[in-house]
Image (tube, rainbow, N blue to C red):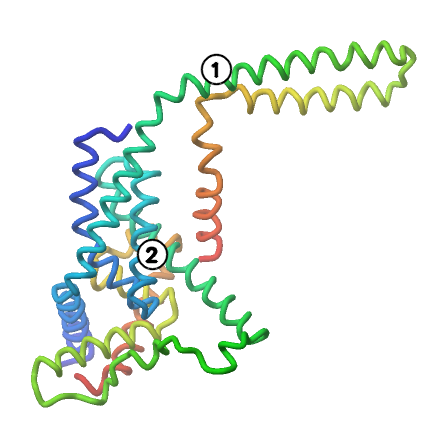
Amino acid sequence: MNREDKETVFIADAKADLDEALRTLDPAIASRLRMARHRALDAAAEKQRVPWLLPAVGFASASLGVLALFFLLQAPEQKQLVSRNTSKGRSESRSGSLAGSVEDLELLASSEAIEFYEDLEFYGWLAEGNRAG
Amino acid sequence: MLDKKQSGELNQFLAGVEGRAFVIARIATRDAEAALDLVQDAMFKLAQKYGDRDESEWAPLFHRILQHCIRDWQRRTWVRNKWRTWFPSNRDKEGSEEKDPIEAVPDIRARSPLNHLADKGTRAALEIALHSLPLRQRQTFLLRAWEGYNVAETAGIMGCSAGSVKTHYSRAVRALRIKMRAYQ
């Protein structure tokens, strides 16, 4: 047998050993794996059942959005009342904060993206793993 | 949306891979309890994040998640061990009552004259040899040789290039053959 043949035989033997390890798995372990699987599927189904909550979440988001908009529109008016002679720099910083507030508003109002934001940690975890690899 | 049909298919898929995933995790951790936790984590993540994906995507996604879970576990274990080295607790100083996992590993040289015990010894030796490989080599060997993924698929699961897969695989096979010489 040449080197390649020996390697092929070795890999086949290793595969057979691993298959045997799987075949002779402790029944108690197999049972716990089965339970873990059912728990995972139940949890996923539970998560999928939550959509009836989505209208409520959407309503809450919309309310938050309206509230944020209300304060956003109120704030500049109040500032104008306090000092009418504001410098140019100040007005620029206010427009900067306005832009930031608009971004926050988008985040608050987008109900369809809620799941994505909830899963951000998971996607970050996957990406970090890939970078490490 | 995960409908009833999809849930049934996912159940069937997980039932088919859970045993192999457990063996892979046990080889990585040398600890059945930790391996069970890792497989459970991987099943939870697949069901919750990707349960509604196409069935053909589940296998590579599941292995990818499992490999990440194993890597995370190894990092945590490494940090915990470092912490224990720097700040040993009283229990560590007096000698832990917990069993040393190394002691629980069967002695590969202690072969019984009975054939089935010899086979068990060979399997245990293979698991120890696989455990001693660097993480990427072990992953590559198990995905390629046992799970039957080709180079491109393995590269996709591991998030590396096909060239890296080939290098890791050939190094793994060479190292394993040396470690298993006594059993060949």
Do badges 1 and 2 share one subunit?
no
From the viewer's perspective, is residue B181 above or below residue A119?
below
| Viewport quadrant of the N terminus of chain A | bottom left
Q: Residue at x 61, y 23 (%)?
A: A103
In terms of secondary structure, where does tag 2 sit?
helix
Q: Position of residue B147 (x, y in %)?
A: 21, 58
Describe residue B50's horizontal placement relative to residue B118 as left or right: right
Q: Nearer the viewer, mark 1 or mark 2?
A: 1
Tell which residue pokes out farthest to the left in this image.
Answer: B115
**Chain of the residue that carries numbered disc 2 in the rendered image:** B
The quadrant in which residue B27 appears is bottom left
Q: Residue at x 36, y 55 (%)?
A: B158
From the viewer's perspective, is residue A21 above or below residue A104?
below
From the viewer's perspective, is residue A88 above or below residue B159?
above
Describe residue A32's horizontal placement relative to residue A102 as left or right: left
Q: Residue at x 52, y 15 (%)?
A: A62
In terms of secondary structure, where does tag 1 sit?
helix
Q: Which mark is residue A59?
A: 1
Amino acid marked by disc 1:
Phe
Q: Which mark is residue B20?
A: none
Question: How far, Cα to Cα, is label 1 from label 2?
Answer: 38 Å
Residue marked by disc 2: B38
Q: Are marks 1 and 2 in contact (CB under 8 Å)?
A: no
Q: Residue at x 37, y 64 (%)?
A: B136
Q: Nearer the viewer, residue A71 or B121?
A: A71
Near mark 2 (Cα within 10 A), the count class, few <14, some 14-19 or many ≥20, is: many
Q: Position of residue B154 (x, y in %)?
A: 30, 55
Q: Nearer the viewer, residue B97 or B15?
A: B97
